[in-house]
Amino acid sequence: MKLKIAIIGCRGIPNFYGGFERLAECLSVALVNKGHDITVYSSHNHPYQNKDFYGVHIHHCYDPEFRLGTAGQFVYDFNCIKHARKQNYDVLLFLGYTSSSIWGRFFPKKPVIISNMDGLEWKRAKY
């Protein structure tokens, strides 16, 4: 069965940043190779501006982090969620959980929602 899957919560692929981006890159390419339809949401100012990466669809959303700092991540995540609501995905994989605490009520209703919290996030002093 071919699934339509989206990955939200990273800065984009290919990986130029860190762990979530590495996960998104490796997982998305592997799932495409298994025959699934995969989209990764990427920042509009990600260095890679193509709409495809080894068969993975890339959707660039506006990301004001360069202007707003950390608060911009919430806006970026909301922009990704707004777009995803209209796409009829079967599965949404959210990387991180900070924004889901305020945007959770806007998640699309149909897809299965999976959240990867990052194994070390709980150790950060701010949490």
Image (cartoon, grey):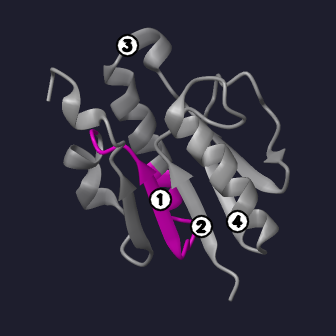
Q: Residue at x 53, y 65 (%)?
A: 86
Quick check: 3 above or below 68? below
Residue 16 x, y percent position in the rendering:
66, 24
Instruction: Specify the amino acid type for callout 4.
Output: Leu
Give the spatial CA distance, label 3 vs label 1: 24 Å
Give the spatial CA distance, label 4 vs label 1: 13 Å
Quick check: 61 above or below 112? above
Asked if labels 3 and 2 touch by Cβ distance under 8 angstroms, the answer is no
User: How packed is label 3: few (under 14 Cα within 10 Å), some, or many (20 or more)?
Assistant: few
Asked if labels 2 and 4 touch by Cβ distance under 8 angstroms, the answer is yes
Residue identifier under label 4: 31
Give the spatial CA distance, label 4 vs label 2: 9 Å
Region rendered in magenta: 81-98
Asked if labels 1 and 2 touch by Cβ distance under 8 angstroms, the answer is yes
Q: Earlier in the sequence, mark 4 or mark 3?
A: 4
Residue identifier under label 3: 69
Residue identifier under label 1: 93
Q: Earlier in the sequence, mark 4 or mark 2?
A: 2
Give the spatial CA distance, label 2 vs label 1: 8 Å
- On the image, which quarter does residue 55 sit in? bottom right
